[in-house]
Image (tube, coloured by chain):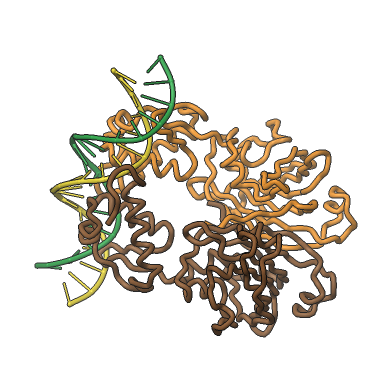
Chain colours: A brown, B orange, C green, D yellow
DNA sequence: TAGTGGTCTAGACCACAGA
DNA sequence: CTGTGGTCTAGACCACTAA
């Protein structure tokens, strides 16, 4: 099962083994895991070591632990995990989620910028998607997304028109990890200004985001142009 | 020393006790702490409990632990702690720190907005500071800062003209904790456009930030207007 | 009442740094 | 070689949940 000595710490191996099972769908979102003692026995580690692994997964929001209840698989669509990838907030501080409409979808050879940002080799393919997000009938963001074709095989053939990154990852059994978003101001492009219903060249928030998988592979590069209605804003937590 | 039963967990009490000593300057930045066993004995807890407390402080970036070396107090001016409160990055991804010039400083009764954002009672005083930040001779941000007078007694009499929040907190023995920053776009104010050398009403990044102390008291409300030179941006990490 | 995770203890051995 | 933190073990008892 887990390697003994001359290798990574046991609690990291146990953590990754549990994460792998969740990614594989062996333990589905909302399901309850065996208790600490049973898991420890299954992975042949001490209860203390197993606990450390489970606490790590809890801090990574992959598990939820409740005293007296048990250990549960956190749903990727749960509020605390959605909020991580959506920093736009409405006037009540709620994540500004919106319906997604796909405008274009094409497969192509990764260009130089895509290879750099997604850390791809030459000759690797990407899917390019242009989408619009709307909330209450009002489009607030248009985005250009590049996805490594290797991570999302057959994406063009699947019906993914209304799916965001979180839902896509779930459909492909990919666990998302760290990411970085760069925020700046640009003049709206022709397409964006039309879709957003603003004058051409109006200043919009430009969101340049790269999200990695749990294992550190680049999973998405997104460039979004975004308008902020009154009282809506881009929120950043400092911990 | 620490309360026994009927109270918060021992590892949290130990964590706070260590944090308190650091804030009081008993252990200065860069200094080495006693080893785990000695600390455990001093606080009358088991080594495992003491370790949990120290690991927490390490995850809060208050301590640095090095195998074979010891446990050290992290400097508030160290890169990893500065970067938390400065999300502006230059083209190389380095934090965009800048010299600070104070334009105005006044003490006043907190107005309604300040009472709401800083969670102050009526009749509480605040210090209002207007400053400019410049890097390589170019002003890139003007900011209006409100500080609770109760936390920073006698601030007007001290020479704090070139100090930012991090340095101020250190001078007053305050440990900073969580915070939130809201990012949006506004038309530059008269004062800002002049200081930043841009046309009046040009779009600028508006940064609205509240930072708390470690204990959760509001320590600062800042409203900054900011221009982004080529290749500079506002960076957000998603963990 | 039984089962869960949360806290706490008291050790062991290992990897690493420095004298 | 000594001292440090990092890992790992094997228990104990407590607080909470649900049947």
In this rendering, position of residue A127 left or right of residue B3: right
The answer to whether residue A209 is seen in the rendering is yes
In this rendering, position of residue B70 left or right of residue A229: left
The answer to whether residue B119 is seen in the rendering is no
Q: Position of residue A88 (x, y in %)?
A: 62, 67
Q: Nearer the viewer, residue A73 or C7?
A: A73
> Residue at 68% of width from left, 60% of height from top?
B183
> Residue at 53% of width from left, 67% of height from top?
A83
Position of B41 relative to B12 (above/below): above
Q: Position of residue A47 (x, y in %)?
A: 23, 53
Q: Which residue reaches farthest front?
A: A123
> Residue at 56% of width from left, 64% of height from top?
A219
In this rendering, position of residue B194 left or right of residue B236: right
Q: Position of residue B39 (x, y in %)?
A: 33, 31
Q: Nearer the viewer, residue A189 or B183?
A: A189
Residue B201 occupies quadrant:
bottom right
Q: Nearer the viewer, residue A233 or A216?
A: A216
């Amino acid at each position: 099962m887990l390697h003994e000595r001359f290798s990574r710490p046991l609690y990291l191996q146990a953590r990754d083994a549990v994460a792998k099972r969740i990614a594989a769908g062996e333990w589905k979102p909302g399901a309850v895991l065996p208790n600490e003692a049973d898991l420890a026995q299954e992975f042949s580690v001490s209860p203390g070591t197993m606990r450390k692994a489970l606490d790590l997964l809890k801090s990574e929001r992959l598990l939820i632990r409740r005293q007296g209840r048990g250990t549960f698989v956190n749903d990727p669509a749960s509020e605390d995990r959605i909020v991580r990838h959506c920093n736009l907030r409405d006037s009540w501080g709620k994540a500004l989620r919106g319906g997604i409409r796909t405008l274009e979808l094409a497969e192509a050879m990764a260009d130089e910028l895509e290879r750099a940002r997604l850390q791809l080799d030459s000759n690797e393919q990407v899917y390019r998607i242009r989408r619009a997000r709307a909330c209450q009938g009002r489009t607030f963001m248009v985005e250009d997304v590049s996805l490594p074709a290797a991570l999302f095989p057959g994406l063009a053939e699947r019906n993914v028109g209304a799916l965001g990154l979180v839902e896509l990852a779930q459909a492909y059994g990919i666990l998302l990890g760290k990411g970085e978003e760069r925020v700046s101001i640009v003049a709206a492009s022709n397409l964006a200004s039309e879709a957003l219903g603003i004058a051409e060249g109006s200043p919009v928030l430009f969101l340049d985001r790269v999200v990695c998988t749990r294992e550190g592979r680049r999973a998405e590069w997104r460039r979004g142009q975004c308008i902020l209605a009154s009282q809506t804003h881009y929120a950043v937590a400092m911990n």
